[in-house]
Image: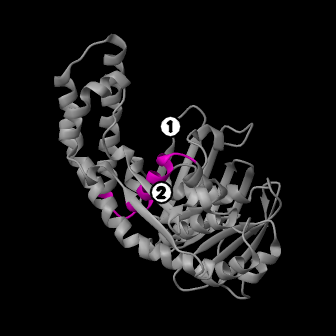
Amino acid sequence: MILRQLNILHYKNIHEADLLFADKLNCFVGLNGQGKTNVLDAIYLLSFTKSAFTTLDSQVIMHDESLAMVQGTYDSGDVFSCGLKRGQKKQFRNGAKNYSRLLDHIGHVPLVMVCPQDGELIEDGSDGRRRFMDVVIAQRDKAYLENLTTYNALLKQRNSLLKQMSDQGTQDESLLEVFESQMTAPAQYIYSVRTAFIESFVPIFQRVYAQISGGEETVTLTYASQLQDRDLAEAFVRTRSRDIILGWTTQGIHKDDLMMCLGQYPLKQVASQGQQKTFLLAMKLAQAVYLGHPILLLDDIFDKLDAARVERIIHLLQSDEFGQIFITDTDRQHLTDIVKPGPDARIFNVQGGHIS
């Protein structure tokens, strides 16, 4: 999928922009805070129906404006648009037709984004690492997204019931059984798909890491799940009393994690900033290879990397493994090194929300 044209109105600090893109490389140059990342976020919105950085739609509407609009025209002939108006429900359209469910759009425009916030995958808890798996799998497997949505809704209901029982000092196992009986099937599906994904993904990730690092380091990425050594239905029964005391569900695929290692040791404990950045970048670029030429958004990726790794990344991005790329940087030289003269590349200057 290639994004041919992007139209933006009142999105964050971008008052208005009508942009035509090259098929391969589109580079945005400007100082920090000028709006480079906001362009990428508008493109992200058209793939995932929401901003990459906030769950509140009102926060993406320009100050002192009542509405915002983003529209993208793709090489497939599809035109997707999102209209946001303060105090009203977001409208997301395929041509002139509104989606009845935003979930139905996921996967239509495959996309991978690399940004400084990816550091949370290492620094924070397991939520982000599960989301890393979910985002890429959901773009290829509609059934996965349906099962994940069902499981999360049931988990929320079970947790609410557990909290109520904990607060009131009551215990009603029959109600808990209702949720548990419905949670096991989607949990098993999610576990099996995540397992298959990691088996396919890790060799790609390790190859990309070696290409960026020069092959000097060994990395591993391992999927850890409670379902690897227990039956979830039995685990629910065994831990009900404890769950009621705690007020939340201790068993299930919502506890899954990814173990990241450099050599034989946890990445967070032994890796330098440059090695951590390389690890995360390799994970995201491997996502793009796995999905097969999705739109790739690269926001400020060169920070904390030595010159040799930057050079290898530039070489890698120029390969046929990657499709259309949107990249931001404050240093024009990096982008000049990437961009080759011709119709396949464009450089945009961004200043105060104005793009030229």
- The image shows residue 149, relative to residue 246, as above or below, that is below
Above or below, 34 relative to 160: below
Q: Which residues are magenta?
A: 124-143
In the image, residue 172 sits, relative to residue 94, either above or below, namely above
Asked if one can make out residue 62 in the rendered structure from this viewpoint, the answer is yes
Pointer 2 local density, CA inside 10 Å: few below 14, some 14–19, many at least 20? some
**In front here: 215 or 252?**
215
Q: Is residue 127 part of the magenta span, yes or no?
A: yes
Residue sitting at 60 percent across and 82 percent down? 316
Q: Is residue 158 left or right of residue 204?
A: left
Q: CA distance from mark 1 to mark 2?
A: 27 Å
Residue at the (33%, 33%) spot, across then down:
249
According to the picture, the residue beneath numbered tag 2 turns out to be 132
Say which mark, if any, is on residue 89.
1
Q: Nearer the viewer, residue 100 or 119?
A: 119
* Secondary structure of the residue carrying numbered label 1: loop
| Image position, residue 275 (x, y; %) | 64, 67
Q: Tell me where residue 34 appears, x and y as whole percent.
A: 80, 55
> Which amino acid lies under the numbered mark 2 shown in the image of this protein?
Phe
Quadrant (top left, top right, bottom left, bottom right) of the C terminus: bottom right
* Predominant secondary structure, magenta span: helix
Element type where label 2 sits in the image: helix
| 278 drawn magenta | no
